[in-house]
Image (cartoon, grey):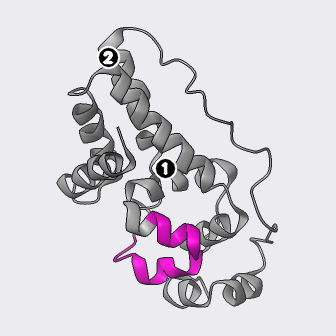
Amino acid sequence: MDETEFWEIVDRTREAADGDPEEQADLLVDRLLQLDPDSVLDFARHFEARYNRAYRWDLWGAAAVLLDGASDDAFDYFRCWLIGQGREVFEGAVHDPDALADLLGEFDEEVDGDGEELGYAADEAYEQLTGVVAPDLGIPPQPEEPEGTALDFEDESALADRYPRLWERFGTA
C-alpha cells in the first residue's frame, strides 16, 4: 500500500462517517477487513509513522487551544484524530499548527479532537483477519520527548501569541 492508497482509505471512511471519529474507526476496521493481512500492516505502518511525526510541541499546543487543555492521553488521541482528518489537514497542521484555524470547519470538542479508536483500527482488523496480534511494525518508536520547544499550555497569553488564528476562533479568552 502506498501513501495515496492510505489517504484514500482515511478520506473515504471519514466522509462515510460524516466526520464522526468513532464511526470512522468502525468503518475503517470494516474497510481494512477487505484487505489481506500484509496490506493491513502497511496501513498500520503509514498510520504509525504519521502518528510519530505529529509528536511535536507546536501541535500539542494547538491541541491545547482546541481542546481547552490537552493531557498526554488527550494529545495521543488528538494525533489519531488529526490523521483521520485526511492528508490536507494533517500535512497543513504539521507544517503550521496555527493553520488548523483555516483547515477545520466546525469543531466540537465533545466529539472532535479524539480519535482514540482510529489508532486501534489496523490492530483490530489484523487480529480479526489472522487470529493473532499484529507483529512489530519495524518502524522507529516515538521519541521520548516531542520535537521542538516545549510550551506552557497554562499560559493563555503565550498560546494566544503562538496561535493567533486558532486562539481567535477557538481560544477560551
Against 40, is 12 above or below? below
> Could one spot residue 26 in this view of the protein?
yes
Q: Quadrant of residue 97?
A: bottom right
Q: Which residue is mark 1?
A: 80
**Residue in view at x 39 percent, y 61 percent:** 87
Q: CA distance from mark 1 to mark 2?
A: 21 Å
The secondary element bearing badge 2 is classed as helix
**Residue in view at x 66 percent, y 64 percent:** 60
The secondary element bearing badge 1 is classed as helix
- The location of residue 165, given as percent across then percent down, is 54, 89
Under mark 2, the amino acid is Gln
Main SS, magenta residues:
helix
> Could one spot residue 109 in this view of the protein?
no
Quarter of the image where the N terminus is located: top left
- The location of residue 135, given as percent across then percent down, is 53, 17
How dense is the environment of label 1, judged by Cα within 10 Å: few (below 14), some, or many (20 and up)? many
Instruction: Choose between 18 and 11: the one closer to the eye.
Output: 11
Against 43, is 70 above or below? below
Q: Which residue is mark 2?
A: 128
Is residue 112 shown left or right of residue 167? left
Under mark 1, the amino acid is Cys
The circle on residue 56 is none
Residue range in magenta is 90-107
Q: Quadrant of residue 32?
A: top left
N-terminal label among 1 and 2: 1
